[in-house]
Image (cartoon, rainbow, N blue to C red):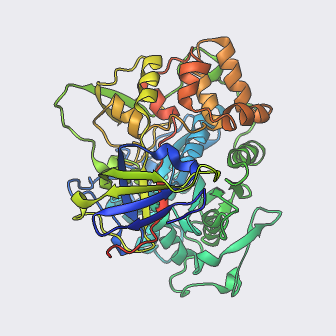
């Protein structure tokens, strides 16, 4: 079994053993245990947790009733403080697989108040999981048109055009239903596919927009920000579903802008961002700003920063904010802690209360389905004279044959684990008790603008110990993004440390960041234990700032039995 230096080869030697060949760039995954799960094909282990049920409840329920007879329910809407938020409400929706789109969404949210907007962040899964029938029924009839919106359209409208977050009706004018405004951050996953938490939303929008073949959808942005879409079979206008399914104006009271996250190494570059931008417009939405497209093969974060500062915020200010705003404090430059979307509840040993599965991010569901299998053998396949490394790895699945089922070409996801020495060093630097058991909960305190209004607000399941949190869920060794460095600067007590982090997080410090962080393979563990030792960061804040440790996916090339 031979593989190139950067490849993985997975095969079976009989049913109880899986063999993996590792390239030189993946040796960090070695350990005595591998947590892994399968996705794709008929053998997917992405299943609902058998021990957990989805809790009921409306993701947008703020305790205020919507009066269906009054259409948009203007008489039930609380007035927004327009002096504090002259730009009105702004909702940010995200479709994220690894957390980057969500991170961008929350970064916008953290800046919203200083820009004059009252911001909420919503997981796209929560749009389709909304089970408040009263809100959905109200959304069927709150458009000023003869034909009522169908069930799927009402489900989308119940969140995207929720009267509680519209502008123009908080003044109590019952004849004015106002408009909603939203930003969408959509990552493209795999070969042009939606992320797990955006799949159902995309399916509904296919029917409502009439864009049938989204996987061959391409296009450029014209001078007005619209997508000049086309497919291999003709123009975008020619690729429609049954016209009886299409609803060309059911989102006519929505203003929107889209940022797509993709990689030009893949054929369907930024497919989801392009599709949603076109679909929202075809359903009557009004584009606030041209679509932004981020390329992870080049500088995704730089593309986002450029769109945010030079396109998105200027467009929002021009359209919704009149006059200049009073400057707000920058937490990175002050001694105050920034707001945090989480809070910690420390538990006594033996407390087995669990956070409901529907409180965990959709992209983190593998934590509920992964199984623990030991590595039974490993050996180097290359000779000392051959540069690089290809390892032969055997994973013993003999004790997990009841749940580990797979077919050729399924994908194997391996959950890496941080080295215990690194974990202990981080805990010592930040004064964490590794044996402490805790619950991670949403921070729903008034005034916390970063708290999402959705169910899927937590990044991983708890209770767990601090050691388990740092070992399994926090990426301590990967290079942090520039935005992560800016957040870390808020916790640096020393001027030199804070200024260094802010400098490398800035546009001007891009080259320094690349040299000192990316090319030097510096992770957050290196920063807090060595480079910036003045950082003092509470556990809940560290969880918020530190990127998640992501699964590594590899294609299985062997038969499931021999």
- Name the residue at 57% across, 16% down: 533
- Corner quadrant of residue 127: bottom left
- Corner quadrant of residue 229: bottom right
- Name the residue at 23% across, 53% down: 52
Seen as rendered, the residue at the extreme left is 350
Relative to 315, say whether 467 is above or below: above
Would residue 309 be found to the left or right of residue 168 on screen? Answer: right
Q: Nearer the viewer, residue 172 or 417?
A: 417
Q: Is residue 172 visible?
A: no
Residue 16: x percent and y percent?
Answer: 27, 64
Q: Is residue 283 visible?
A: yes
Residue 313: x percent and y percent?
Answer: 72, 43
Seen as rendered, the residue at the extreme top is 494
Relative to 211, say whether 529 is above or below: above
Q: Nearer the viewer, residue 347 or 367?
A: 367
Relative to 224, say whether 247 is above or below: below
Residue 388: x percent and y percent?
Answer: 62, 51
Seen as rendered, the residue at the extreme right is 223
């Amino acid at each position: 079994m031979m593989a190139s230096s950067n490849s993985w080869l997975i095969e079976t030697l009989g049913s109880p053993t899986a063999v993996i060949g590792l390239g030189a760039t993946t040796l960090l995954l070695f350990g005595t245990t591998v947590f892994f799960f399968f996705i794709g094909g008929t053998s997917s282990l992405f299943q609902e947790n058998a021990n957990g049920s989805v809790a009921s409840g409306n993701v947008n329920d703020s305790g205020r009733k919507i009066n269906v007879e009054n259409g948009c329910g203007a008489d039930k809407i609380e007035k927004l403080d327009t002096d504090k938020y002259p730009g009105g409400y702004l909702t940010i929706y995200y479709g994220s697989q690894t957390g980057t789109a969500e991170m961008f969404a929350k970064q916008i949210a953290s800046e919203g108040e200083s820009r004059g907007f009252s911001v909420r962040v919503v997981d796209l899964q929560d749009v389709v999981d909304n089970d408040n029938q009263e809100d959905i029924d109200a959304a069927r009839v709150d458009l000023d048109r003869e034909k009522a919106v169908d069930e799927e359209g009402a489900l989308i409208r119940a969140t995207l055009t929720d009267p509680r977050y519209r502008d123009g009706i908080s003044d109590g004018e019952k004849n004015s239903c106002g408009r909603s405004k939203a930003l969408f951050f959509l990552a493209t996953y795999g070969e042009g596919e939606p992320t797990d938490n955006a799949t159902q939303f995309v399916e509904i929008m296919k029917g409502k927009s009439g864009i049938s073949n989204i996987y061959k959808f391409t296009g450029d942005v014209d001078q007005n920000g619209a997508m000049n879409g086309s497919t291999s079979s003709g123009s975008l206008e020619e690729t429609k579903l049954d016209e009886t399914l299409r609803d060309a104006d059911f989102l006519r009271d929505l203003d929107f802008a889209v940022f797509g996250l993709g990689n030009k190494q893949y054929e369907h570059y930024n497919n989801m961002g392009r599709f949603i931008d076109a679909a929202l417009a075809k359903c009557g939405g009004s584009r606030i700003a041209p679509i932004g497209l981020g390329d992870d093969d080049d500088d995704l974060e730089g593309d986002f920063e450029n769109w945010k500062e030079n396109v998105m915020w200027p467009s929002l200010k021009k359209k919704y904010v009149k006059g200049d705003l009073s400057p707000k404090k920058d937490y990175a430059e002050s001694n105050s802690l920034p707001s945090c979307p989480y809070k910690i509840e420390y538990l006594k040993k033996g407390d087995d209360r669990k956070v409901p599965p529907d409180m965990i991010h959709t992209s983190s569901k593998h934590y509920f389905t992964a199984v623990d299998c030991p590595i039974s053998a490993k050996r180097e396949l290359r000779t000392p004279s051959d540069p690089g490394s290809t390892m032969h790895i055997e994973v013993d699945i003999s004790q997990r044959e009841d749940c580990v089922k797979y077919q050729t070409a399924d994908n194997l996801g391996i959950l890496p684990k941080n080295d215990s020495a690194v974990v202990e060093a981080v805990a010592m630097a930040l004064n964490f008790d590794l044996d402490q058991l805790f619950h991670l909960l949403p921070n729903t305190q008034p005034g916390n603008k970063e708290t999402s209004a959705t169910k899927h607000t937590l990044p991983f399941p708890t209770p767990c110990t601090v050691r388990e949190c740092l070992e399994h869920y926090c990426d301590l060794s990967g290079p942090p993004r520039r935005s992560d460095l800016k957040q870390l600067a808020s916790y640096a007590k020393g001027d030199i440390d804070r200024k260094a982090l802010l400098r490398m997080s800035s546009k001007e410090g891009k080259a320094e960041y690349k040299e000192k962080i990316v090319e030097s393979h510096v992770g957050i563990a290196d920063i807090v234990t060595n480079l910036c030792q003045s950082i003092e960061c509470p556990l809940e804040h560290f969880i918020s700032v530190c990127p998640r440790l992501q699964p590594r996916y590899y294609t299985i090339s062997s038969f499931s039995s021999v």
